[in-house]
Amino acid sequence: EQPYYAVGQTLNVVDTPLGKIGVNICADNYLDGLPIGHTLARMGAEFIIAPASWTVDYSITEEHDPYQEKWVKPFSILAQLYNVVVVSVTSVGYIVGGPYEGKKSVGCSLAVDAHGVRAQGAFNEFAGQLVVADLARPHRPERGTDIGLMLQRKGYRFDQLP
């Protein structure tokens, strides 16, 4: 995908009537990209919106569900550490042309908060349902260095590699 996308230069959180919203995109939510989510949460995001295109080989079916570790785990880490809601929507269908020829997008949109998965779309290249979730605005009173203290209380270690 490198020829098609550019690396962003900034992160921002926007205050809206629905809450403070940060945006990251697709692989920014892999475990190795999670510092972006940490940064958005430390910037005060209450909701992290993460549009994506989750693609797999044609042979992968719902029984294989490769997204537990790839998506649910990192979303849950952010949600539980910072009390944020992470919402990711994704496409469905077979991919024709380009670098992902021979793959399919399988839906499986997610909404995760500190209590776990709150909504999940079907894992299927034909999934077309609209998933609606009533997600409460998280209460996030910590600011500045209080965020670090809160993370320490939760057992987060700043001085160790994972």
Image (tube, helix red, strand yellow):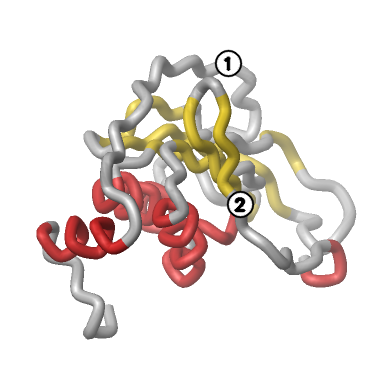
Q: List x then y, in percent, for residue 111.
A: 42, 33
Residue 162 visible in the snapshot: yes
Question: Whole-Å distance between the Cαs marked 2 and 1?
Answer: 28 Å
Give whichever of 59, 113 is nearer the camera: 113
Q: Quadrant of residue 162?
A: bottom left
Residue 129, position as x, y percentages in the image:
58, 16
Residue that label 2 marks: 12
Instruction: Name the element at disc 2.
Output: loop
* Residue drawn at point x = 40 percent, y = 56 percent: 42
* Residue at the spot of label 1: 130
Q: How many residues crowd around disc 1 within 10 Å: few (fewer than 14), some, or many (20 or more)?
A: few
Query: As displayed, is residue 27 above or below residue 52?
Result: below
Q: Amino acid at mark 2?
A: Asn
Q: In screen coordinates, is 133 left or right of 79?
A: right
Q: Earlier in the sequence, mark 2 or mark 1?
A: 2
Q: Position of residue 31 (x, y in %)?
A: 42, 66
> Which residue does the image show at 61% across and 52% down from the upper left?
12
Q: Nearer the viewer, residue 147 or 159?
A: 147
Give me the residue at 85% from left, 47% from top: 96
Q: Is residue 67 visible?
A: no
Which of the two residues, 11 or 160, is positioned nearer the viewer here?
11
Q: Residue at x 26, y 36 (%)?
A: 116
- Is residue 136 rendered to the left or right of residue 100? left
Q: Label 1 is placed on what type of residue? A: Leu
Direction from residue 26 to residue 32 in the image, left or right: left
